[in-house]
Amino acid sequence: MDGPEHCDAKEVSRSHTVLWVFSIVAMFVLYLLTAPPVYFRALSKDPKHVSWMTTAYIRPYAWLSEKTPLKVPLDAYSRMWRNRFLGKR
């Protein structure tokens, strides 16, 4: 029962699991990298009228920044993008 066919199926299953985990982590990291530039770009265009979609997009990032130990690096990253789009404050 543990012939070559069985081992290959296990390896394929394991490689698919690794691929899915990598994909989920990559999407999370890409989100963290894109949220501040999207938000500050929208603010630089029209500070009084940031769309509800932009606000909804940035909300998880804001929550991570406020409620987790990632506050310091996320705030520094946001500050870098704020300075890029809105100038130093």
Image (spheres, grey):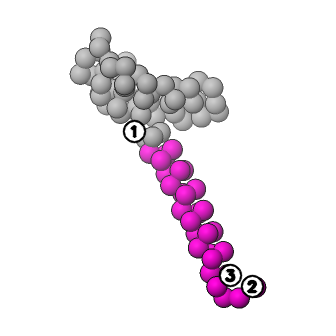
Disc 1 to disc 3, C-alpha distance: 42 Å
Q: Are marks 3 and 2 in contact (CB under 8 Å)?
A: yes
Residue 66 percent location from the top left of the image? 59, 24
Q: Secondary structure at mark 2?
A: loop
> What type is the residue that disc 1 sits on?
Thr
Q: Residues within 10 Å of mark 2 (few under 14, many from 20)?
A: few
What residue is pinned by disc 2? 2
Residue occupying image coordinates x 66% and y 74%: 10
Residue occupying image coordinates x 51% and y 44%: 28
| Side (left or right) of 69 relative to 23 | right
In the rendered view, tell whether residue 25 sits above or below residue 36: below
What residue is pinned by disc 1? 34
Disc 2 to disc 1, C-alpha distance: 46 Å
| Side (left or right) of 19 relative to 48 | right
Residue 50 percent location from the top left of the image? 32, 18
The quarter of the picture where residue 71 lies is top right
Q: Secondary structure at mark 1?
A: helix
Q: Which comes sooner in the sequence, label 2 or label 1?
A: 2
Label annotation for residue 74 = none
What residue is pinned by disc 3? 6
**Residue 23 vs residue 72, the one in the foreground:** 23
Quadrant where the C terminus sits is top left
Q: Residues within 10 Å of mark 3 (few under 14, many from 20)?
A: few
